[in-house]
Every structure is written in C-alpha cells, then in structure tokens.
Amino acid sequence: MILGRITGSVVSTIHHPVVGGRKLLVAERLDASGHPTGGYVIAIDAIGAGFGETVLILDEGNGARQILDDSEAPVRSVVVAIVDAVDLDKG
Amino acid sequence: MLLGRVIGTVVPAALVDELSATPLLWVQPLDRDGKPDGDPLVCADGTRMAGRGQVIYWVASREAALTLDPWFVPVDDAIVGLVDEVRLYAPEDTS
C-alpha cells in the first residue's frame, strides 16, 4: 500500500461498469514523512475519503478486486484507509 | 489508473483474433494538471468510445486485459473510462 493525499476527483460518465456508482479520487503520492513525491494515482474510493485527507491506497490488482467484490474488475488502486498519523523513527 | 489524452489511432495490418474488434489508440499520459508526462503508449479502448483529443483514464498490466471481453487477451495498457472533468481542489480549500 502507498500513502497518498486526496487532491481532487474525476467525473466520468462513460466508463467500465465497475466504476459505476463509485467515486474516483485523484491522490498525490506521499513519502513516509508526508511530502509529495510528484506522482499521483486515480483510485476508487472504498471508504468515503474526502479532500485533503491522508489515505492508504492499495495499489495491487488482486486485493483491489477482492475489496470491490468483482473478480474481473480492471482496477488496481483503491483507497482503503484514512490515516490519522504516521509515526516515524527519526533515528 | 492515470490520466491520458488520445492523440491518434493505430491501424494494425495483422492482429491476434481476440483483439480484432478492439480499437487501439495512441495515448499521451498526463500529469494531474493535464500536462503531458512521459512517452505515448498504445492503449486498447475498453469503452470503444474514445476519440482523438479525448481525455481518458487508463490502467496498465493485467488489469488492462480485464477491461475487454473476452479478457484473456494480450493487452497491457487499456482505457477504462472517459474523463468529463477533473476537479482539483485549490490548496487554500484545505481545512
């Protein structure tokens, strides 16, 4: 899983059926200390994450299909948790 | 999934049978601000509705083949949906 911060959403009328009724979020990738790495990912929202929140994004297909309960879903990025805090050993 | 813009079509002279009815499109990957980011690639169009200039989101690797029916096909980049709008919130919206 990767750390990300929600920075926006994607509106899509024409899409694969698995996207129907689900929210597509734009998340910037973060490093362990919470700084943007420059990358981003479009992920399906599984928990109701909102703008500005730091989240955990599952970035792997089989787990994503399990969460979406669809064995043929063409999805690999799913927002699976909202992060309260990251404790990092400074040592 | 990542954003991209359709910049052209690919017309194969010969193609595996499973892909014979699938559009193949040139896609320029975009960053989240809509600027080109990286080299163009060829995507199978799972929606069959993308045209030149269309902003789309696409997926790579095994998930790409799953956009198609049948899905056991030799494809590693595919369009999942068409983008109407990307809503990026301004940093001052941060609470």
Image (spheres, coloured by chain):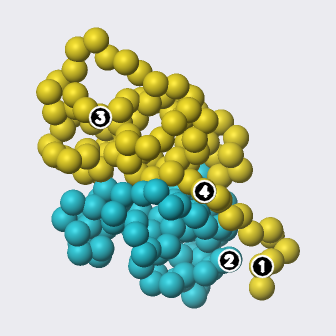
Q: For the residue labelled by badge 1, is the local secondary structure a helix, a strand or a loop?
A: loop
Do marks 2 and 1 share a chain?
Answer: no
Q: Which residue sits at x=30%, y=50%?
A: B67
The Cα–Cα distance between marks 1 and 3, rounded to whole angstroms, is: 43 Å
Q: Which residue sits at x=34%, y=45%?
A: B46
The Cα–Cα distance between marks 2 and 1, rounded to whole angstroms, is: 6 Å
The Cα–Cα distance between marks 4 and 1, rounded to whole angstroms, is: 24 Å
The tag on residue B94 is 1
For marks 4 and 1 on the same chain, the one whose residue lies earlier in the sequence: 4
Q: Are marks 4 and 1 in contact (CB under 8 Å)?
A: no
Residue that mark 2 sits on: A52
Q: For the residue labelled by badge 2, is the local secondary structure a helix, a strand or a loop?
A: loop
Residue A12 percent location from the top left of the image? 53, 61
Question: What colour is chain B?
Answer: yellow
Residue that mark 4 sits on: B84
Q: Residue type at mark 3?
A: Thr
Please tell me whether residue A86 is drawn above or below residue A20 in the rendered image.
below
Residue that mark 3 sits on: B22
Determine if residue A87 is in view.
no
